Image: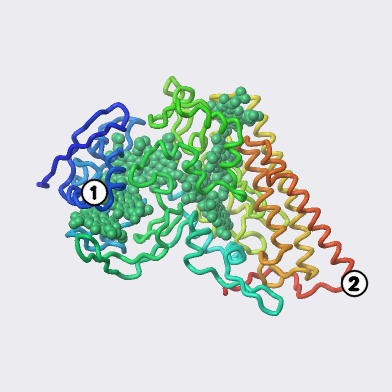
Amino acid sequence: MKIVAYFVIFLGCVSGIAMAEIPISNATKECVDCHSSFHPGIVEDWKNSRHTLFSPGTSMKNKGAARKISAVSVPNNLANTAVGCAECHTLNAESHADTFNHNGYKVHVVVTPKDCSTCHTEESAQFEQNLMSRAYGNLASNNVYQDLQRGVLGEMVRKDNKILYYPPNESTAGESCYYCHGTKIEVKGLQKRETLVGTMEFPKLSGWPNGGVGRINPDGSKGSCSACHTRHSFSIEMARKPHTCKECHTGPDVPSYKVYSASKHGTIYDTMNSEWDFRTVPWTIGKDFAAPTCAACHVSLLTNPEGDVVAKRTHRMNDRLSWRIFGLFYAHPRPKSPDTSIIRNKDGLPLPTDFDGGFASEFLITENEQKARAQTMQAICLSCHAKAWVDGHRQRYENTIRQSNASIAVATGMMNDIWKKGFAKGIRQGESMFDEAIERKWCDTWLFYGNTIRFASAMSGGGDYGVFADGRYQLTQSIAEMQDWLNLRLQLFSGREAVNDNGKFKMQSAK
Ligand code: HEC
Ligand code: HEC
Ligand code: HEC
Ligand code: HEC
Ligand code: HEC
Ligand code: HEC
Ligand code: HEC
Ligand code: HEC
């Protein structure tokens, strides 16, 4: 029999319940007793969380949507106490490379999706199918994207009037690209630290701190649930509010939040949300909120006031998406696998589209699947809008995908000519495609302007973002400037033959 200590927790902040008495395990009591003086911020945040409100066993008794535990069963030793420090930080100790001996317990610092899956099985399994959980590898294992990364983050050295790029160091990478995409966290031995209760030994972690969505954890699992459910409140309210997504989806390359906050939906959210209910499950359209947030359109379980399900919850957040509007280099149907590093286009490059705009279709969802996913999304719109409004929006969006891709084809065709003529050295010469000024101008067209136009159209944030704020104005201007740049060189070097071009693409080898 396990000894269980009783611990009174005041739950003034949790709606509906004034006070509850939850048994907490002896192990957790020890952690709390000591940590409440070292880390009061952590302990108080945890006390206010739902993890101290119901034990997994009690929670399992709930039926239907109200049940927050998706596991079929929870191990006996976890069933009857609050989910406390020890329950999370000692779970699966043997599979964690970051496990260390700590006051008689085998504790790990990084609590992973695999740990959460003990109770939240479905969310964790779905998140594995989410692009986000692969965001580290999708960047680190793709040599075209590594080329872009080196051009942006690399250490620059000037030699013979040329700029050379060396790979970025770990600290730079950890606070830039991998801040959002997630780092690879590795244990680099143990280190002793003086604390107020004596010398203690802790694991030394590289790639830490990090809360990126696709980080590689010391137990081999991928991603971080605390990217959206920050520790230690793990709140659904936070995840449903758009600021949570803003941290990473804000642009100018990925301007979801900017266009949302400038849209009517964002305006209604900003002005009215203090009257909405962000905690109740399921989330009832009209009753609990009057305009959608990111979560409502992409993640949440939504019902109508009669209780009928309008959309199922998904942590595989591509279930409602048909196009990948983030141009690589063109918008394209969404990838089939969350691991995009396996994609090859017709030139053998790890890209979902060709230079001329063709799709690497074998790796992308079919047109039928696109239609089905669009309908799943539209079912949500139809709870607040009439069909003509929703169809009109979709028709404009499809038009924007076609038109913006056509503009990117003009820019990319021109860039290809520039490489062919040797005015810049890129993929045709086995050199970087992203390190010269004219190449960057071409990047601006698809990475910033093409994307912003499409995001504005998709998320109804029309206004400035589709036009003058990184929109159509800048896109057309950049293409005109590229043409000017090329014309000038054609005049200066007329008659000169193409340099170094054997007609084949080859990637720059990793330095
Ligand atoms: C006797 C006091 C004491 C007890 C008991 C205790 N801790 Fe700690 N713990 C500390 C101190 C002190 C630190 C280091 C604080 C600092 O960084 O200076 C620490 C650090 C940690 C860290 C962060 C490690 C790192 O890499 O920085 C975690 C996670 C942790 N404790 C979890 C737990 C858990 C879970 C329990 C219960 C099973 C527990 N602790 C019990 C005192 C204690
Ligand atoms: C529901 C699981 C869960 C519970 C319960 C929990 N933790 Fe954590 N803890 C986490 C997660 C997740 C992180 C964030 C680390 C990460 O990103 O993986 C974390 C981080 C920490 C850290 C490192 C924070 C930092 O910023 O350096 C400490 C220390 C810690 N927890 C102590 C505690 C203590 C003490 C308790 C009990 C009062 C507790 N934890 C309860 C999941 C949990
Ligand atoms: C030992 C089981 C267990 C583990 C491990 C666990 N949880 Fe929970 N979780 C619970 C229980 C119990 C509840 C409250 C259920 C209820 O209200 O009925 C809960 C509730 C939640 C909620 C809903 C909060 C709200 O505001 O409605 C979120 C989000 C959550 N957990 C995330 C996590 C994350 C992320 C991890 C891993 C870092 C994790 N949990 C680990 C058992 C667990
Ligand atoms: C502020 C957060 C953030 C930072 C910093 C960031 N990214 Fe991203 N990245 C994202 C988001 C969000 C997406 C998904 C875009 C979408 O689909 O809307 C993404 C997607 C990508 C993709 C597509 C990957 C695929 O195949 O699915 C590439 C490539 C990429 N980013 C490259 C980079 C590079 C290179 C850097 C650093 C120079 C970087 N990112 C920095 C947030 C970030
Ligand atoms: C810590 C950074 C971060 C946060 C916070 C974040 N995202 Fe992401 N998100 C990313 C990155 C990076 C990608 C792209 C990964 C890739 O392409 O490899 C992405 C991709 C996505 C995708 C495409 C998923 C797929 O499987 O196709 C959706 C949808 C999305 N995010 C929605 C959201 C929403 C909604 C929120 C807030 C509730 C959010 N994100 C919070 C970084 C983040
Ligand atoms: C990109 C943001 C994001 C990430 C990452 C994320 N979640 Fe969530 N999660 C959400 C949103 C948004 C909701 C609210 C869904 C709703 O309204 O139905 C939610 C809801 C939940 C709930 C509440 C379920 C309920 O019935 O109340 C649990 C439990 C949960 N998530 C667990 C996890 C776990 C475990 C992970 C990691 C494997 C995770 N989440 C990662 C955004 C995220
Ligand atoms: C009114 C519903 C709605 C709201 C609110 C909304 N979105 Fe979207 N989102 C869409 C639609 C529609 C698409 C395009 C779907 C398609 O292609 O079929 C989309 C596409 C996306 C994508 C995919 C990008 C890519 O590269 O393919 C991401 C990521 C995303 N939204 C994130 C967010 C974030 C973050 C927020 C909040 C700041 C948000 N969305 C708010 C409806 C919405
Ligand atoms: C919870 C209700 C709700 C949902 C769900 C919803 N909307 Fe809206 N939407 C509104 C409200 C309210 C307005 C403001 C109408 C007005 O101007 O009076 C609005 C405005 C709009 C606008 C007008 C923007 C402008 O100012 O011209 C568009 C376009 C739009 N929605 C499209 C969509 C699409 C597409 C979806 C689904 C992907 C969707 N909405 C989902 C409530 C909703």
| In this picture, residue 234 sits left or right of residue 393 | left
Q: Nearer the viewer, residue 199 or 240?
A: 199
> Taking the image as four quarters, which one is ligand 4 found in?
bottom right
The residue positioned 31% from the left and 43% from the top of the image is 45
Residue labelled 1 has its Cβ within 8 Å of some atom of ligand 2 = yes
x then y, percent, for residue 5: 13, 43
Q: CA distance from mark 2 to mark 1?
A: 77 Å
Q: Nearer the viewer, residue 355 or 155?
A: 155
Check disc 2 and report the residue beneath it: 495
Q: Nearer the viewer, mark 2 or mark 1?
A: 1
Question: Can residue 321 be seen?
Answer: no
- In the picture as drawn, the residue positioned furthest to the top comes out as 306
| In this picture, residue 476 sits left or right of residue 175 | right
Check disc 1 and report the residue beneath it: 36
**Which quadrant is home to the C terminus?**
bottom right
x then y, percent, for residue 449: 69, 49
- In the picture as drawn, the residue positioned furthest to the front comes out as 196
Q: Where 289 sits versus 470, above or below?
A: above
The residue positioned 18% from the left and 43% from the top of the image is 24
Q: How many marks?
A: 2
Q: Secondary structure at mark 1?
A: helix
x then y, percent, for residue 345: 64, 59
**Neighbours of disc 2 within 10 Å: few (<14), some (14-19), many (20+):** few
